[in-house]
Image: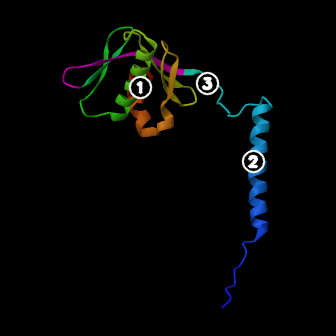
Amino acid sequence: MATGRRRFPVLPLVCAGALIGIALIGAVGARLGGGPTTRQQPPAPTASQRLLHFEDRPDGSVAVYVSETQHPVHVLAAGTNGFARGVLRSLVRERRLHGVDAESPFRLTRWADGRLSLDDPATGVQIALDAFGPTNAGAFAALLADTEKTP
């Protein structure tokens, strides 16, 4: 009894190999050519900005203070604001790795193009909060709310 074995068509294999080769050549050419590999948005002017301190409280909440006045802005209740807490933990961890004083303020900035970022001037780390979606960025946008009111 003879079994009819069919061969896989060669043309699709050749085309797939050529496509992979072209992609690799393009990537290597861009990298070695010195051109930018990613596009960054040009910096926008600052719309509003605030230097903030965050303080853990014994009840598990986190108090947020304006750096210049030590005026309380907000309290992140215990068990809430998981995104904000996660971002702050990562920035504090970075400070420990760099041996930076915990008393240095963090800078929360709303840019003129609507972007929102939190950065640590002491370590140079900047987090683009909008990258995590509007709900998560909104947790920090609330901390700028009273600086953005118009009279």
Is residue 23 visible in the rendered image? The answer is: yes
Range covered by the magenta-colored residues: 47-60
Residue 30 quadrant: top right
> What amino acid is at disc 1?
Ser
**Dot in front, 3 or 2:** 2
Residue 151 image position (x, y, % from top left): 43, 21
Residue 25 quadrant: top right
Query: Badge 1: few (under 14), some or many (20 or more) residues near its Cα, within 10 Å?
Result: few
Q: Are marks 1 and 3 in contact (CB under 8 Å)?
A: no
Which is nearer the N-term, disc 1 or disc 2? 2
Q: CA distance from mark 1 to mark 2?
A: 36 Å
Left or right, 103 with reference to 42:
left
Residue 26 image position (x, y, % from top left): 78, 43
Magenta residues: mostly which secondary structure?
A: strand
Q: CA distance from mark 3 to mark 2?
A: 34 Å
Which residue sits at x=51%, y=36%?
131
Residue tagged by mark 2? 23
Residue tagged by mark 3? 44
